[in-house]
Amino acid sequence: MPFKLRCKVWLENDRGQPIIGEGRLRILCALRRTGSISKAARKLNLPFRNVWAKIKDAERQAGFKIVSTTGSGSKLTAEGEELLSLFARLQSSCHRSARTKFRQVFCSGDGKPRSTDGRLDAERTPHAHTEQ
């Protein structure tokens, strides 16, 4: 089958401003592992300024502190740890559900494409596009 499922999951505040998605999740995970914004930026091959700006923007949109910084480095606050953990669980669950639904809709019981003539059946044509 030539189709691949792609989906993105992110959280927004009540004004529609993004708080966390795949990119910010990667930044916060790298910060947790390295204990430093600059080391996280280097690990992700991103400019420090961009990583710092993403963290500050996430905090502004969330309405709480996500990262605490001291003279010896940076770490996630308790709220930041909870946000990271809950979002990672949500994202994993959404991706699992999307893969299951994709197989139900686009594949027959043996995992092969439903359509044998290379065309989608009209009632199975997707009306919404998801991407990752």
Image (cartoon, rainbow, N blue to C red):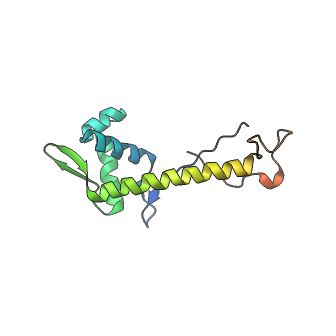
Residue for point 24% across, 42% down: 35
Residue 83 placement: quadrant: bottom left
Which percent across, then down, holds residue 87? 43, 55
- The reply, left or right, for residue 15 in relation to residue 40 is right
Residue 61 visible, this angle = yes
Residue furthest out toward the left: 71
Residue furthest out toward the front: 110
Residue for point 33% across, 33% down: 43
Query: As rendered, which of 15 and 40 lies closer to the eye?
Result: 40
Q: Is residue 123 above or below residue 44?
A: below
Q: How many marks?
A: 0
Residue for point 24% across, 48% down: 75
Q: Is residue 66 above or below residue 3?
A: below
Which percent across, then down, holds residue 48? 28, 38
- The reply, left or right, for residue 127 in relation to residue 87 is right
Quadrant where the image shows the N terminus? top right
Residue 10 visible, this angle = no
